[in-house]
Amino acid sequence: MERFVDMHCHVLPEVDDGAQSLDDTRKMLQMAHDEGVRYIIATPHYHPHRGKQPPRILRRQLRLVREEAAKISGRLKVYLGTEIYFGQDVPDRLEREEILTMNRTRVVLVEFSSVDSFERICQGIQQVQMGGYEIILAHIERYQSVLTDIDKAHHLVQMGVKIQINADSITGENGRKVKRYVCQLMDHDLVFCVGTDAHRPKVRPPHMKSAAEFVTKKYGEKYMRRIFFSNAGDMLLKKKKRDESR
Ligand SMILES: [Fe+2]
């Protein structure tokens, strides 16, 4: 069975609009495991409306999630990050460690409003980069200003941005236009990694398998493994052994 890294997942219970209870968490972990996911970076929102819990609470919830994951399988590992909605306060808060990076690396998962202009997206990215952080841009296919023009994705990659797409965009659940765009991104080798962006057992569930099968058929197994496993794994899980012992 293929193994996947899901580096965008709202599996932490009761901290945002993701898992609403430990029972939701349990179901999501089981589904992810059955789909072949072996490493999850839980990415609760840092967002003005969807959730903004401090690291202390997030770490406490992570412990609960890890206990549940261990009951399913010793091979299902969960780490902590944040999906950061960009705002002017973000660079300072990162520096003060009030917002968590991805698994204690200098990598951050950043999102913007779907209607932000391309200029605002680029400026926001540069502000975070200036603090010495590497950026994974969450679900690029959601930003209207980028979706219309593949050159904009090229531009972002040239800026050093890593591009994340959602698994359900590959399988067409977000419409044909979005599916066409993510295929175009893959045609141009602009995708760094795929995440589920799972929220609850029934709200964008943590499905990976059929998206991975589609990519394998269209682009080959080697490419699929890169964007579903090794790119994110190499970048975010290097300190795996040290963190597991904590
Ligand atoms: Fe998300």
Image (cartoon, grey):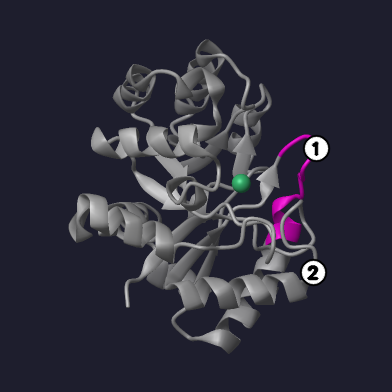
- Residue 163: image quadrant is top left
Residue 177 horizontal/vertical position (percent): 47, 32
Q: How many marks?
A: 2
Q: Secondary structure at mark 2?
A: loop
- Is 24 within the magenta? no
Residue 238 in sight in this render: no
Q: Secondary structure at mark 1?
A: loop
- The answer to whether the beta carbon of the residue marked 2 is less than 8 Å from any atom of ligand 1 is no
Q: Residues within 10 Å of mark 1 (few under 14, many from 20)?
A: few
Q: Depth check: 87 or 9 in front?
A: 9
Q: Depth check: 39 or 211 in front?
A: 211
- Which residue corresponds to mark 1? 49
Q: Residue at x 66, y 34 (%)?
A: 93
Most extreme residue toward the top is 119
Give the residue type that dot 2 points to. Answer: Ser
Q: Is residue 227 left or right of residue 28?
A: left
- Residue 201: image quadrant is bottom right
Q: Which residues are magenta?
A: 47-58
Residue 114 horizontal/vertical position (percent): 61, 27
Q: Residues within 10 Å of mark 2 (few under 14, many from 20)?
A: some
The disc label shown at residue 21, or none: 2
Q: Residue at x 62, y 56 (%)?
A: 204
Give the residue type that dot 1 points to. Answer: His
Q: Residue at x 65, y 67 (%)?
A: 62
Q: Residue at x 56, y 63 (%)?
A: 206
Q: Is residue 54 left or right of residue 198?
A: right
Question: Where 14 sits versus 147, above or below?
Answer: below
Most extreme residue toward the front is 176
